Amino acid sequence: MSLLSFGLFLLLSPALFLYRQWFLLLTSLCSSSLSSLQTLGSDGVRITMESALTARDRVGVQDFVLLENHTSEAAFMENLRKRFKENLIYTYIGSVLVSVNPYKDLEIYTKNHMERYRGVNFYEVSPHIYAVSDNSYRSMRTERKDQCILISGESGAGKTEASKKILQYYAVTCPASDQVETVKDRLLQSNPVLEAFGNAKTLRNDNSSRFGKYMDIQFDFKGAPVGGHILNYLLEKSRVVHQNHGERNFHIFYQLIEGAEEDLLRRLGLERNPQQYQYLVKVGRSRLSLSCLMHPGNCPKVSSINDRSDWKVVRKALSVVGFNEDEVEELLNIIASVLHLGNIQYGGEDSGNAYITTDTQIKYLARLKSPLNLEQAASARDALSKAVYGRTFTWLVNKINVSLAYRNASVIGLLDIYGFEVFQHNSFEQFCINYCNEKLQQLFIELTLKSEQDEYEAEGITWEPVQYFNNKIICDLVEEKFKGIISILDEECLRPGDASDITFLEKLENTVGGHAHLTTHKLADGKTRKVMGREEFRLLHYAGEVNYNVNGFLDKNNDLLFRNLKEVMCMSDNKILTQCFDRAELKDNKRPETAATQFKTSLAKLMEILMSKEPSYVRCIKPNDAKQAGRFDEVLIRHQVKYLGLMENLRVRRAGFAYRRHYETFLQRYKSLCPETWPSWQGKLADGVSTLVKHLGYKPEEYKLGRSKIFIRFPKTLFATEDALETRKHSLGERERERVTSRAVVVQAWWRGILACRRAQRRREAANTIRRFIKGFIYRHNERCPENEYFLDYVRYSFLMKLRRNLPKTVLDKSWPTPPTALIEASEQLRKLYMQNMVWSYCKRINPEWKHQLEQKMVASEIFKNKKDNYPQSVPKLFVGTRLNGEEINPKVLQSLGSEKMKYAVPVTKYDRKGYKARPRQLLLTSNSAVIVEEAKLKQRIDYAALKGISVSSLSDGVFVLHVPTEDKKQKGDVVLQSDHIIETLTKVAICADKVNSININQGSITFTMGQGKEGIIDFTSGSELLVAKAKNGHLSVTAPRLNSR
């Protein structure tokens, strides 16, 4: 038995007050000595950050801030490697969470894990995405200030999965109701919808988000999620019309083709083959991949993607989010139309104008009529496809927002946005993405420094200015009015004349060519020119240098659509398209904003949103390009560490103090290291911490005491303290073990005595019972007396219990347990009562139909039981109401019967009186007579009153004789018949004619009257088979097989 079990027994014993007091004292001593030894393993016990420091040589530190050499990138990488090797994918940089994609399932996202992080202080548990989620949620609830979580990283690093985990955490841990559950479902199901329309397979990631997403999760005053709102940024529309080698278009195209029902595909005019559609096989310029070798030029099928299964998920999600069937149909019509649009091919006329050569697509699309040349027509087609898909995606996001709308709520925002991108060929999209990351880095540094400064000021500690790289100069280079790159690009797009990508590059050189963070091939030195193309310019970002190719900059920035195409879209019957293309747009003569300006404006609004909220950060890292579990590609990771600015983040965070904790937490953990604070400190917390650090020998430059926290400057100071605590644990453990052991011996001795007394008492009681039983057995035949009363009561009780377990189950079951002598009379009375009750219950359950059936069976038993061979075979077969239905009886016969009600009808064989020839007949029983019918003629009617008797043999044949009076001139003599249902037929005749006692069962032969005073004889003999024939002696011979010996 455990110590806890002993304690529970002592606490529940009112006579053991002193022991109870001793146990409470022992418990308090154990808890005070072990309170600082908490860990968190797979069983759910907590591991604090300090506890994990003892294993830092194997698993690294949980916070990069605690790295001794925090400026060393090698030390940073080594710590990341150690943790990745141990499947510890999360690490902090202060309050920033660094997440490494494991490329495998880890058992760290269960409901139990969610509960461990729920309502727990940020640093009381090991790093996890749930810790960030819970910290933001609690800050929103307690501080009443909106929060946001910024998730960044390159494609394949796990940003989308991180946002899903955060949503799942809130869905499970937040308060719920029926309405809240609906909102939770819509929040969760919006993900597969947005992924289908906005994600695609790229070289780096099979489910890469090709748009930026900011989602507000709205909470009511109870803390329950009640709504949401989504903003989308810079959808990669160019992917609609072409993709790089080894990449795919957006998921929804393949899901529709692979998963849709045949009827739906037929309505949309689609075939179940992605290779039939140009937009799904068009490829641009990029490096080749393994998947590309498997699918040359395109990548319609990917082993890790199940389009058919994903289609089912998306269809269900659309319904949950709030789409009705008509909206889904119109949405899919648009997707199908984009595919058909891509299949339009053009030919050129002598005049230079283009015409459509693919007539099969015309029935699915409006005919395009414009005086364009071949190249212009193809560009117009692609521009229309991109515009339709892009605007439909925006409509889709707005539709989801309508289903999630809620007012006056607290908010936690999730920003899932592309990380810094550097490819072999970088274009307009990478320029916008990296500009976005510059703005986010600028915001991060400003907010991080502000947070640090606010904490120092709140604790009364002098703030020391931190030197850091201010990337405002790069942001200004991109966005500054009139002189920024975006302004120069817009001016080149809008000016009259022959503007081109090259003229844009030249204007860039002339306007900002002297900027320290920009260079071109023309402006660069000889060494740089070797790695730059003539059509490229280079920006020196905070994360490194990136070369941008200007080809396509002007076209992508203009993103224009011909006016006549807009007019066609406005006239569409599709309700979604008419919302996407507003007629008011046609009346507005103002030139629409360029793509870059729109992006800059939306980014400025995003920065305002983020500045108004308390931010948390998740930095996602991809460990390798092959998506292999356990593989740590140091070159690739070092590249991401640089582009994510993690070393800069760490340097800013470590500019002051590496470690800080509230006085209560610090004193509770380390109080055992100082005799004055152990086992408890009774004074002020600040004085207790001051006494403790003086005893530990902290130097003044190693720490500062704030108003409510202690700040430790160097990690080595914390490591030394933690190592001392580890040593102290062992000594405390030994002492405590000795004290507990000595006290446990006393408890065990006392408890063994209690158990021994109980065992002795049970033995005495058992011996007395055996003695009484033996004495009762000896006097069992005497009258009831004190010596045998216990035995007799037991015998009676045993019989009654046995009887209870073995009562008959049916009225036919005659078994009954044998009673003892004293209970014979009582047993017989019980048996009679029980049988009467069973019979009464059985009769009560019988319905009228079944009662009638039993009555007929009783008559048959009375007549034939043990008298006719084939009677036993008839017993399990139910008697039927008639053997002939209305269609088998001629209507003339029924008309002849008139008002007489027919009770039974059966087909029979009649044997003539002359020659015994067999004739098929029908025997009809009415309420007054038996009628023999030949087709439509009534051959003979025998009134029941005139029926003298019925003769039948004892064998298994079906022959019987109806005896009639010889003086009756209407009758020609007795009737010889044969029926396949002899028992049923004669029972029916006996009941209808009331002749139960007039049926004669004969052995050997039957004599019957043939008419005119003559007699006939039927001889019955046993044989192997049934045979009826005229014998040589003139008798009717019936041979029947013997079925029953009777």
Image (tube, helix red, strand yellow):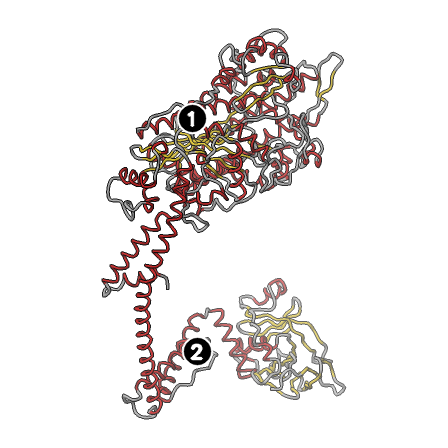
Give the mark nearest the N terminus, 1 or 2: 1
**Which tag is nearer the camera, tag 1 or tag 2?**
1
Q: Position of residue 322 (x, y in %)?
A: 48, 35
Which quadrant: the N terminus? bottom left
Is residue 330 visible in the rendered image? The answer is no
Q: In the rendered view, does 214 fall on the left or right side of 1031?
A: left
User: Could you say which is closer to the camera, residue 176 or residue 635?
Assistant: 635
Q: Residues within 10 Å of mark 2 (few under 14, many from 20)?
A: few
Q: Residues within 10 Å of mark 1 (few under 14, many from 20)?
A: many
Label 1 belongs to which residue? 610
Q: Is residue 533 above or below residue 1036?
A: above
Q: Dot 2 lies on which element?
A: loop
Which quadrant: the C terminus? bottom right
User: Could you say which is closer to the camera, residue 24 or residue 584?
Assistant: 24
Is residue 515 visible in the rendered image? The answer is yes
Q: Position of residue 639 (x, y in %)?
A: 57, 30
Residue at 74% x, 85% y is: 1031
Q: Dot 1 lies on which element?
A: helix
Label 2 belongs to which residue? 806
Q: Toward which corner of the image does residue 836 lie, by quadrant?
A: bottom left
Q: Amino acid at mark 1?
A: Leu
